[in-house]
């Protein structure tokens, strides 16, 4: 598949490009841009010694920040044409909502099968937070909390009666793909989760389970050549 990696920090973008070249990753494109709800110019707040905490500032932020180029996922959708996204990973230090608000056409027309995003624990009910609300409003996704322990990783459905999940990583899965996901990762039962028909382990074919039709709906096509997107 094809991978688009968004990295707005020049130093990190250069390092990523060197890594891509040294490892011969011809299917990975590094885009030195920040992703948000609009295209144009913006500013980033960079923390000394902590590159992972960089944040895109609001338009009215004070001057003195690092300049960057902004884009939206809808702009990427225009470039992709009829190709679909299999996976969208969003880790943007609290700006997940604006990123998804800039993906209106993507979510309405060619929604990703799986969206991995962060939502840090806080006192705001889960579905009142911007990113979960945008995804829930599409009616296309079931959202799972990614629960980790020393021995296992599992997915737990987040229901309307569970307003304050304790985790920070979440997986939004298209309703039609949940059965295939259940054959790969353990799912905890949940009151709001759809009924799952899990294939016995001996019959599982996860390499084929996540196949998906293209927009023109030809016969099933392997996901080779399908783009993955991971703004960072």
Image (cartoon, grey):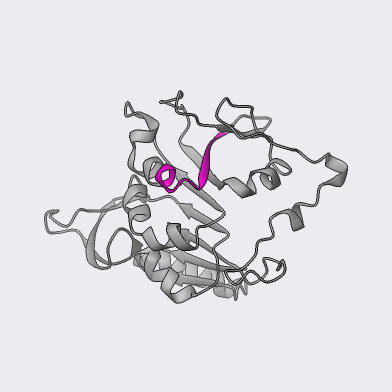
- 166 over 24 or under it: above or below: above
Q: Quadrant of the C terminus?
A: bottom left
Instruction: Name the spot of residue 225 as percent of width and height, x first.
Output: 63, 72
Q: Quadrant of residue 35?
A: bottom left
- 96 over 161 or under it: above or below: below
Instruction: Name the spot of residue 132 as percent of width and height, x first.
Output: 41, 41
Image label count: 0
Q: Which residues are magenta?
A: 135-146
Residue found at the far right of this picture:
202
Please give left or right for residue 201 compared with residue 159 in the image.
right
Please give left or right for residue 103 compared with residue 216 in the image.
left
Instruction: Name the spot of residue 179 as percent of width and height, x first.
Output: 69, 43
Instruction: Name the spot of residue 184 as percent of width and height, x first.
Output: 72, 44
Q: Quadrant of the N terminus?
A: bottom right
Q: Nearer the viewer, residue 6 or 164?
A: 164
Q: Quadrant of residue 185?
A: top right
Q: Is residue 172 magenta?
A: no
What residue is drawn where x is 64% and y is 35%? 153
Task: Examine the rendering and report whether any part of residue 50 can be seen.
Answer: no
């Amino acid at each position: 598949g094809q991978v688009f990696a968004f990295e707005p920090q020049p130093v990190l973008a250069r390092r990523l490009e060197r890594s891509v070249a040294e490892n011969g990753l011809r299917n990975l494109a590094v885009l030195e841009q920040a992703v948000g709800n609009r295209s144009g110019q913006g500013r980033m707040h960079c923390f000394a010694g902590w590159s992972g905490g960089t944040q895109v500032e609001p338009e009215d932020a004070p001057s003195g920040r690092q300049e960057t180029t902004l884009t939206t996922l809808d702009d990427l959708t225009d470039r992709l044409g009829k190709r679909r996204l299999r996976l969208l990973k969003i880790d943007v230090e609290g700006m997940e909502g604006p990123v998804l608000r800039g993906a209106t056409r993507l979510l309405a027309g060619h929604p990703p099968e799986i969206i991995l995003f962060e939502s840090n624990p806080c006192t705001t009910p889960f579905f009142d937070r911007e990113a979960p609300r945008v995804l829930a409003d599409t009616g296309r996704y079931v959202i799972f909390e990614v629960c980790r322990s020393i021995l296992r990783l599992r997915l737990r459905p987040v229901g309307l009666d569970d307003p304050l999940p304790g985790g920070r990583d979440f997986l939004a899965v298209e309703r039609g793909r949940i059965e295939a996901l259940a054959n790969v990762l353990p799912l905890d039962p949940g009151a709001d989760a759809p009924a799952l028909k899990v294939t016995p382990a001996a019959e599982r074919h996860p390499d084929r389970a996540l196949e998906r039709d293209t927009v023109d709906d030809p016969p099933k096509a392997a996901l080779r050549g399908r783009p993955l997107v991971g703004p960072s």
